[in-house]
Image (cartoon, helix red, strand yellow):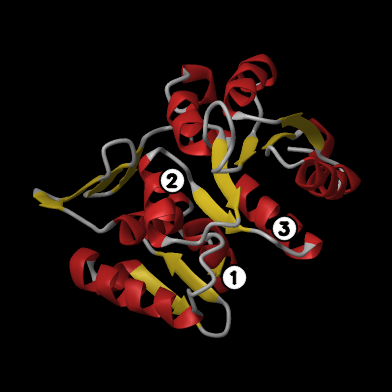
Amino acid sequence: MKKKDTKILLVDDEPDILEIVGYNLTSEGYRVITAENGKEAIAMAKKHLPHLIILDVMMPEMDGIEACEKLRSIPELSETVITFLTARGEDYSQVAGFDAGADDYITKPIKPKLLISKVKALLRRLKEPEDSDTNIKLGNLVINREEYKIVNGKEEIVLPRKEFELLSLLASKPGKVFKREDILDRVWGNEVVVGGRTIDVHIRKLREKIGDERFKTVKGVGYKFVV
């Protein structure tokens, strides 16, 4: 998807944030739509069907948490990526955001270059045409991405969310080597506490549950899934 075709809805009640963040996103080539509160955000989202919504939490009339819940109930926006942009860093606020259906969380203030980097990572989460099927079938292994369910032969396996997302990513293109930085971007996004060692730990756990022969380490590069 070309940047000029990518629509981003920026929602914040602070004019300075709308101006500064909006300017940086527009300068990067994205189409930016703005709203000042949750109610306006819902109306603009229905009208423009953005690919990404950057949503403040604390706003008048309707806060970001409630707005996110309502946005997630709109079928046309089911594939839209939603991230919160807020100065609030409390754990309960982040948990509430994820429970409401948000995909990620960005804490402000944030430097322009880092913001653009985060936006690019978030947009990469949008499903590509070849990824539209909810099932991945590779021999005896079936990954149901809609129900978060794994069946390996006759065995049903329950995986924690990050392990499931990592497996789904690698298995989406068997034989392709996924670079470590790409894995971090697409599975963990902007969770800055995550380090490269985290990937290794999750791969080790997947090897134990799915089979060691399914995962190949490409030294100095990343990992690939083997059929």
Q: Looking at this view, is 218 or 75 the one in front?
A: 75
Q: Looking at this view, is 179 or 109 the one in front?
A: 109
Which residue appears farthest toward the front when viewing the image? Answer: 60
Q: Is residue 200 left or right of residue 8?
A: left
Q: Residues within 10 Å of mark 3 (few under 14, many from 20)?
A: some
Is label 2 in a helix, a strand or a loop?
Answer: helix
Q: Is residue 30 left or right of residue 101?
A: right
Q: Residues within 10 Å of mark 1 (few under 14, many from 20)?
A: few
Q: Which residue appears at 56% of the width and 33% of the height?
A: 80
Q: Residues within 10 Å of mark 2 (few under 14, many from 20)?
A: many
Q: CA distance from mark 2 to mark 3?
A: 19 Å
Q: CA distance from mark 1 to mark 3?
A: 17 Å
Q: Looking at this view, is 126 or 111 the one in front?
A: 111
Q: Amino acid at mark 2?
A: Gly
Camera-near label (1 vs 3) is 3
User: Mark 2 highlights which residue?
Assistant: 97
Q: Which residue appears at 27% of the width and 49% of the height?
A: 139
Is label 1 in a helix, a strand or a loop?
Answer: helix
Specify which label sits upstream in the sequence, 1 or 3.
3
* Label number found at residue 181: 1
Is label 3 in a helix, a strand or a loop?
Answer: helix
- Above or below residue 146? Residue 164 is below
- Above or below residue 66? Residue 93 is below
* Label number found at residue 115: 3
Q: Amino acid at mark 1?
A: Glu
- Above or below residue 219? Residue 112 is above
Q: Residue 121 is drawn in which quadrant?
A: bottom right
* Label number found at residue 204: none
Residue 193 coordinates in the image, percent (x, y): 49, 75
